[in-house]
Image (cartoon, grey):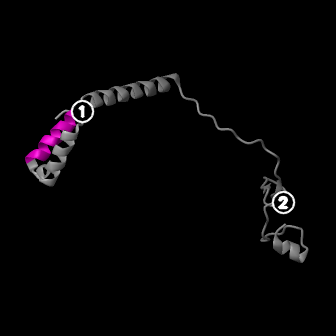
Amino acid sequence: MNIKQLKTGNSGLHAGTPISTETSKRVESASGDGTKPLQPVSPVKDKIEISKEAREASNDTKARELAFARKALLGIPPLTKERILEIQSRIKEAYYMEPENIQELAKKLSRLLGEDE
């Protein structure tokens, strides 16, 4: 029952009467007064089945991504203190703002990422 029904002592349901959590556990039926008690239902457990082909394709994709990452990492020269200082100096001097330097950097990044120019 809801609070309104408790105050008035009305325990029946009528059209337009607010329903509580307890009384809302009813469903409409195709006949009669339109309602019937809800029968206990076991929880629905969804299942997803992934085909063997999909699993293999996923594994192939992961293997390609790992190979790509390995190749990219191996192609990066070690980052020494001297190299870091050089890059910082170039940033301060606006070296990377010059169009030809931006283009050269883009080419190097493309090669690093394995993209064609």
- Which sits in the foreground, 44 or 71? 71
Q: Position of residue 78 (x, y in %)?
A: 24, 33
The label shown at residue 33 is 2
Q: What secondary structure predominates along the stretch shown in magenta?
A: helix
Label 2 crowding class (10 Å Cα cut-off): few <14, some 14-19, many 20+? few
Q: Position of residue 70 (x, y in %)?
A: 32, 27
Residue named by callout 1: 78
Q: Position of residue 45 (x, y in %)?
A: 68, 38
Q: Is residue 61 left or right of residue 83?
A: right
Q: Secondary structure at mark 2?
A: loop
Name the residue at 16% across, 38% down.
107
Measure how far apart labels 2 and 1 are at the Cα level: 79 Å
The quadrant where residue 58 appears: top left
Q: Position of residue 89 (x, y in %)?
A: 15, 49
- Which sits in the foreground, 57 or 114? 114
Screen quadrant of the C terminus: top left
Name the residue at 21% across, 38% down.
109
Q: Where 81 sits versus 73, above or below?
A: below
The quadrant where residue 84 appears: top left
Q: Is residue 1 left or right of residue 111?
A: right
Q: Is residue 32 left or right of residue 90?
A: right
Over which residues does the magenta segment extend? Answer: 100-113
